[in-house]
Image (cartoon, rainbow, N blue to C red):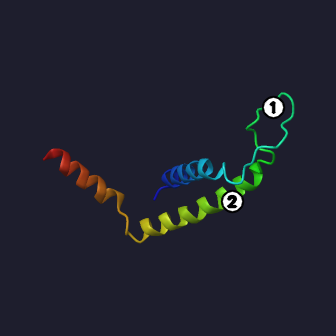
Amino acid sequence: MSVVAGIIIYLLTFWTLLFTILPWGNHAPETPEKGMAGSAPARPRIKQKFLICAGVSAVIWLIIFALVQLEVIDFYEISRQMVMEDKS
């Protein structure tokens, strides 16, 4: 796996997980402040969620990296098969 492919896989994993993790544990305040949206979370804990997301993304990236290095996943073979299917 090239460096660029590794970075792209990590970023795709990170952003997908981030949008999954962001709503966890959010609760609207019982009495929202004037001028704020009533649905705005009282304690969003963004920094904690970013750190969790970065860690989980790193673990997933390591698993994907190992699968590619052990040739369990072979992107070149997959692309060759796709080309053969398109030709037929």
Residue, disc 2: 52
Q: Report the front residue among 8 and 3.
A: 8
Estimate the x, y position of residue 42 in percent, counting from the top left: 81, 45
Toward the front, the furthest residue is 30
Of pointers 1 and 2, the one earlier in the residue sequence: 1
Considering the image in quadrants, where does the N terminus appear? bottom left
Locate residue 20 relative to residue 69 in the image: left or right.
Answer: right
Estimate the x, y position of residue 16 in percent, counting from the top left: 55, 49
The three-letter amino acid code for the residue at tag 1 is: Met
Estimate the x, y position of residue 29 in percent, counting from the top left: 81, 43
Residue, disc 1: 36
State the SS at label 2: helix
The residue positioned 53% from the left and 49% from the top of the image is 12
Locate residue 62 relative to residue 41 in the image: left or right.
Answer: left
State the SS at label 1: loop
Distance from disc 1 to disc 2, alpha carbons, whole Å, reads 27 Å
Label 2 environment density (alpha carbons within 10 Å; few <14, some 14–19, many ≥20): some
Estimate the x, y position of residue 6 in percent, counting from the top left: 52, 55
The residue positioned 85% from the left and 39% from the top of the image is 31
The three-letter amino acid code for the residue at tag 2 is: Ile
Toward the bottom, the furthest residue is 70
Q: Is residue 54 above or below residue 71?
A: above
Residue 70, image quadrant: bottom left
